[in-house]
Image: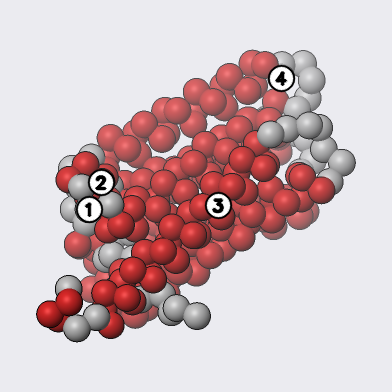
């Protein structure tokens, strides 16, 4: 079994500067809001508007999550300038994912604030815990965190947050496939994306391990 080389798994924020982070976050916020408004409009009068809005914004967040997972490994596996330029946007994509996820959680909890509907205790617990992990991910995205905690602790925070969201998205997709839900192609598609992201990261780790074990003259 090939161990994942931590030096290739996640690059510290100070090593991936980008001038597009603000634009990515703003795009994520605006598109999340548009998706939420569209979902509320389509579900007007059904009582499922906020739940549907949370679901659809969560799907957009998953796309940003997968992009943040694979953009750096792909930049190393495909060493072309456009790919390497895209790899520098990992920080922005991560913050975009945090933004979209926060909007999705707000939609899940909105019935308590608008209309006085009762939100189940498991939903509240999930939103609270997920919000905490999002805060950890947001906190670890600041360069000062790396200087304050040190690289090992910083990487541990990133790995825990990434593993949590990957598992959460994966279990949700599986639950929708095997459970009595309406026919929907999204759960299967999302699982393919998540598995592909994991395979790409393992491929990146394997290539890094192989290159690290080669004699200098053979590189």
Q: Which residue is mark 1?
A: 79
Residue drawn at x 20%, y 62% is 14
**For mark 1, does the 10 Å Cα neighbourhood hold few (<14), some (14 to 19), or many (20 or more) residues?**
few
Disc 4 to disc 1, how far (Cα)? 45 Å
Q: Nearer the viewer, residue 75 or 140?
A: 75
Please identify the residue farthest to the right as the structure is shown: 180
> Residue 132: x percent and y percent?
53, 60
> Residue 70: x percent and y percent?
40, 53
Q: Which residue is mark 2?
A: 83
Q: Which residue is mark 4?
A: 43
Q: Answer with mark 4 or mark 1, whichever residue precedes in sequence.
A: 4
Q: Answer with mark 2 or mark 4, whichever residue precedes in sequence.
A: 4
- Give residue 194's mark: 3
Q: Nearer the viewer, residue 108 or 199?
A: 199
Q: Secondary structure at mark 1?
A: loop
Asked whether residue 159 appears in the rendered view, the answer is yes
Residue drawn at x 87%, y 41% is 180
Q: Secondary structure at mark 3?
A: helix
Disc 1 to disc 3, how far (Cα)? 23 Å
Q: Answer with mark 2 or mark 3, whichever residue precedes in sequence.
A: 2
**Mark 2, mark 4: which one is toward the viewer?**
2
Quadrant hosting residue 189: top right
């Amino acid at each position: 079994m090939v161990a994942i080389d931590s030096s290739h798994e996640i690059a510290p924020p100070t090593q991936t500067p980008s001038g597009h982070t603000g634009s990515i976050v703003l795009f994520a916020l605006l598109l999340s809001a548009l998706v939420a408004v569209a979902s509320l409009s389509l579900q007007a009068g059904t009582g499922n508007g906020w739940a549907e809005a949370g679901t659809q914004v969560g799907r957009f967040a998953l796309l940003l999550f997968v992009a943040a997972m694979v953009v750096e490994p792909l930049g190393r596996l495909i060493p072309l300038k456009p790919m390497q330029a895209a790899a520098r946007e990992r920080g922005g994509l991560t913050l975009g994912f945090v933004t979209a996820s926060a909007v999705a959680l707000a939609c899940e909890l909105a019935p308590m604030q608008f209309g006085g509907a009762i939100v189940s205790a498991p939903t509240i617990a999930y939103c609270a815990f997920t919000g905490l992990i999002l805060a950890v991910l947001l906190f670890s995205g600041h360069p000062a965190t790396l200087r304050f905690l040190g690289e090992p602790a910083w990487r541990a925070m990133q790995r825990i947050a990434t593993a949590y969201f990957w598992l959460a998205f994966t279990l949700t997709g599986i639950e929708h496939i095997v459970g009595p839900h309406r026919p929907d192609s999204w759960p299967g598609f999302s699982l393919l994306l998540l598995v592909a992201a994991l395979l790409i990261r393992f491929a990146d780790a394997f290539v890094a391990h192989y290159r690290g074990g080669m004699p200098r003259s053979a590189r």
